[in-house]
Image (cartoon, helix red, strand yellow):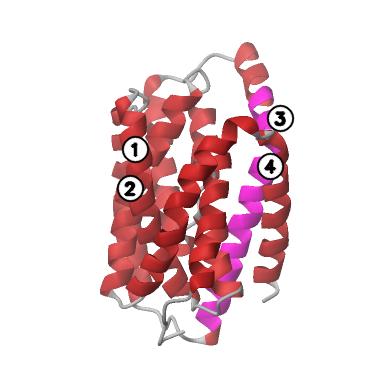
Amino acid sequence: MTNFSFDPLLSLSGFLVGSLVGITGVGGASLMTPLMVLMFGIHPTTAVGTDLLYAAITKMAGTAVHHRHGHIRWRLVGLLAMGSIPATAITLWFMSGMDRKSAHSVAILTTSLGIMLMLTALILLFRDLLMRYEMQWLKRHSTPSPRTIDAGTLVLGVILGVLVTMTSVGAGAIGVTALLFLYPRAKINDIVGSDIAHAIPLTLLGGLGYWMIGDVNWLLLISLLIGSIPGIILGSYAAPKLPEKAVRTTLAIVLVIVAFKLITH
């Protein structure tokens, strides 16, 4: 879609995705990017680049709230960024050198996105089981040293830098779950707040990088924000009144279906 014009359906889609983000806390990219590709025919790299800037803007409000409540571990954020920022820059350099419009490149990008969505869905379904297994493991083994945990956090930053820059997916469900494994005794609010804070430089650098190589559509971005910002606010208010586990399971099933469509697209 090269000559994009304002489409109210995109704003409506943004509102629905924003509402789910407010309810579940799962990053909007898990639904927004595949929605743009499958329903609106937007090129995968344009969808990823635009969604990265969308994520950077929407996560700023979340970071401000978590910072106000003291739910951000800035040292943890710094360790993640030390890995993710160089990884993002290298991935962008790689992306700029490939023929992003070729059928082969499109296939690689859509398949990668589908795999990331499938992984996100599995984490949503089995996160509680995985966390119970880890707590049992910690009871039988000694806690890793602080240096080992720091190294693991740095490596996680590198992995997130590559995956999020390529697909725009992973900073939410995957990042939080990995951090819960690295910091099992930390408060969940601190993990979520730190993950959201780290997502800002990661997605901002990624989005600006895609803009520099010509794969961001600003009108598309505005259309999504018009719908998603009120959607996130509404979802945040509705979240305490809804069965979060049921919503999370439904979302995971939807992600599996979408992932399958992308992989076979």
Q: Disc 2 or 4, which lies upstream in sequence?
A: 2
Judged by depth in the image, the label closer to the viewer, 3 or 2, is 2
Q: Residues within 10 Å of mark 2 (few under 14, many from 20)?
A: many
Judged by depth in the image, the label closer to the viewer, 1 or 3, is 1
Say what amino acid the circle numbered 1 marks: Thr
**How many angstroms separate mark 1 from mark 3 (CA)?**
28 Å
| Residue bearing the label numbered 3 | 129
Which image quadrant for residue 104? bottom right
> Image point 54% across, 71% down: which residue?
9
Which image quadrant for residue 55? bottom left
Q: Secondary structure at mark 1?
A: helix
**How many angstroms separate mark 1 from mark 2 (CA)?**
8 Å
> Image point 59% across, 30% down: which residue?
240
* Placement of the C terminus among the 4 image quadrants: bottom right
Looking at the image, is 164 positioned above or below residue 264? above
> Quick check: is 33 in the magenta stretch?
no
Is 237 positioned to the left or the right of 147 in the image? right
Residue 137 is situated, as x and y percent measured from the top left of the image, at 65, 20
> Quick check: is 129 in the magenta stretch?
yes
**How many angstroms separate mark 2 from mark 4 (CA)?**
26 Å
| Residue bearing the label numbered 1 | 63
Judged by depth in the image, the label closer to the viewer, 2 or 4, is 4
Is 42 positioned to the left or the right of 93 in the image? right
Judged by depth in the image, the label closer to the viewer, 4 or 3, is 4
